[in-house]
């Protein structure tokens, strides 16, 4: 029997065409007036998942 995909994780990640996982950066929901405009712009972008997290998260993501 195969493992189930972690649905909460699947909603927070995007899989690219070449199989890389991207995630949105944390810290962009509230208390934005204290952050600089430059920091706010950078927080909007997606970031590739770090190599150290990739192995364990791919197992939970399932089917990669």
Image (tube, rainbow, N blue to C red):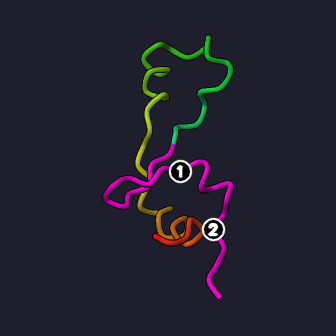
Say which quadrant the C terminus sits in: bottom left
Tell me which corner region of the image, top left, top right, bottom left or bottom right, holds residue 57: bottom right
- Does the segment drawn in magenta span residue 24? no
> Which one is in front, 46 or 39?
46
Magenta residues?
1-23
Tell me which corner region of the image, top left, top right, bottom left or bottom right, holds residue 38: top left
Q: Is residue 41 above or below residue 23?
A: above
Counting every numbered tag in the picture gives 2
Q: Name the residue tied to disc 2.
A: 5
Left or right, residue 49 beside residue 62:
left
Q: What element carries label 1?
A: strand
Q: In this view, does 18 lie above or below 62?
A: above
Q: Where is residue 2 in the image (x, y as percent from the top left)?
A: 62, 83
Q: Where is residue 41 in the image (x, y as percent from the top left)?
A: 44, 21
Q: Name the residue tied to disc 1.
A: 13
Say which quadrant the N terminus sits in: bottom right
Residue at 51% of width from left, 67% of height from top?
A: 58
Q: Is residue 1 above or below residue 25?
A: below
């Amino acid at each position: 029997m195969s493992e189930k995909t972690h649905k909460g994780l699947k909603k927070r990640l995007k899989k690219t065409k070449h199989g890389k996982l991207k995630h949105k950066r944390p810290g962009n929901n509230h208390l934005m007036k204290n952050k600089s405009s430059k920091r706010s712009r950078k927080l909007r972008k997606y970031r590739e998942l770090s190599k150290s997290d990739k192995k364990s998260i791919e197992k939970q993501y399932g089917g990669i």
